Amino acid sequence: MKKRIPLGILIGIGFSFLFPYLPGKHGRRPLIETWDYHNAVIFGAVIFAVIYPIGYSIGKNKLEKKLRGLKLKKHLIEKENSI
């Protein structure tokens, strides 16, 4: 997971610069038509800065839970084989 952080940051930077041009749901106008470009880029960067750490921690917890389950299976198999 730590190796993916730089890639995630690069994607976030790219997203911040492209976000103002993306149309909204149901054919809404792009953000660039209602806001200045620099404000829209900052808004996209703030959204990314909030969402990325949350997603990272959820993914990390999910992987740790899976690892604990695999370790438990390994322990139970070893215990069963030693009997």
Image (spheres, rainbow, N blue to C red):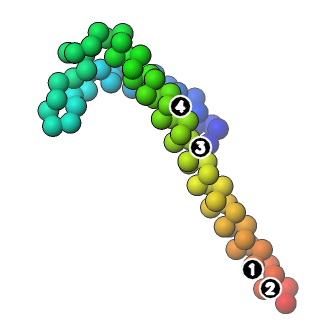
Label 4 and label 1: CA atoms lie apart by 38 Å
- Disc 1 on helix, strand or loop? helix
- Note whether residue 11 is visible: no
Mark 2 residue crowding within 10 angstroms, few (<14) / some (14–19) / many (20+): few
Against 48, is 56 above or below?
A: below
Residue corresponding to mark 1 = 77
Q: Which mark is residue 7?
A: 4
Inspect the image, locate mark 4, and give the three-letter code of the amino acid beneath it: Leu
Label 4 and label 3: CA atoms lie apart by 16 Å
- Disc 2 on helix, strand or loop? helix
Inspect the image, locate mark 2, and give the three-letter code of the amino acid beneath it: Asn
Seen in the image, is 60 located left or right of residue 7? right
Label 2 and label 1: CA atoms lie apart by 6 Å
Residue corresponding to mark 2 = 81
Residue corresponding to mark 3 = 57
Inspect the image, locate mark 3, and give the three-letter code of the amino acid beneath it: Ser
